[in-house]
Image: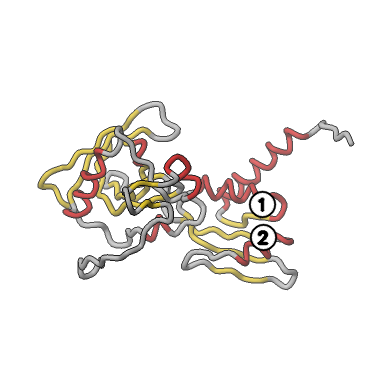
Amino acid sequence: DEDSDEVYYTNLVCRYFNHENCTCTEYQNRCKLVPECLKLDKDNVNYVDTLLTALETNTKIDITYKGAFSDCEKEHELWPVGLYIRNSNLYLYAYDPEHKGATSYAYSRMRTVALRYDEHYSIPVGISMDDCISDPFGVATAEPRRVRVHIFNKQAFFEKEKVWPKGSVLTECEDGSIILELTIVDPAAFHAWALSLGENCHVESPDDLAEWVRVSHEKALGLYKGATHEE
């Protein structure tokens, strides 16, 4: 319990767990069958204890990190907020005091992790794990932003049936379309989602994300100009 620190023991277990020899019965396919299953290997397991210690003791850490689209490794001082799993990958959500903001760091791209002994921290007000795990599109890679999307045709029906994060507002229009307002923390994942809806989606705000989607649609259209369709 995060308030009392009391530990509750349960008898919940993965359906593929073998009780007799404590192994996985579908080890090779585990990440396909259970997307939340965590990938750990001999090269990255060593830092888990360090991160857990940092979280337990509120100790600052230094990490060497290689971004997904970067050719070089960079060093960061971080104040860990929490760990979470998405799509079989482990992420650290942490506050960066240099940039005065919180974002997610993929465990697989951490090259080194070290404790700053005797240097402790308090998470700034307004920073919490809810900021990163509530985004339905991806992991936290930027500051939270509010978006407004107009969804049309049959797609409106499907999106209306989904369970959207707390704080989202869904308004039904007279023509059957819907207006969806929600907070995102992964602009790239939101961009990909909006593109996947094609002509059934219009990003109304913010302007920069709307323009990004518009330009991407124009580039895609350019690929098909002059193409012929043969029956």
Q: Residue furthest left?
A: 118
Q: Are marks 1 and 2 in contact (CB under 8 Å)?
A: yes
SS for tag 2? Answer: strand
The label shown at residue 43 is none
Q: Nearer the viewer, residue 28 or 8?
A: 28
Q: Which mark is residue 197?
A: 1
Position of residue 47 in the picture relative to residue 139 (left or right): left
Q: Position of residue 171 (x, y in %)?
A: 62, 71
Viewed as shown, does residue 60 lie left or right of 71? left
Q: Residue at x 32, y 64 (%)?
A: 11
Q: Is residue 132 above or below residue 40?
A: below
Query: In whole angstroms, how far apart are the C-alphas of marks 1 and 2?
Result: 8 Å
Give, as a three-letter code, the residue at label 2.
Answer: Ile
Label 2, residues with CA under 10 Å away: few <14, some 14-19, many ≥20: many
x, y (%) of residue 139? 44, 49
Residue that badge 2 annotates: 151
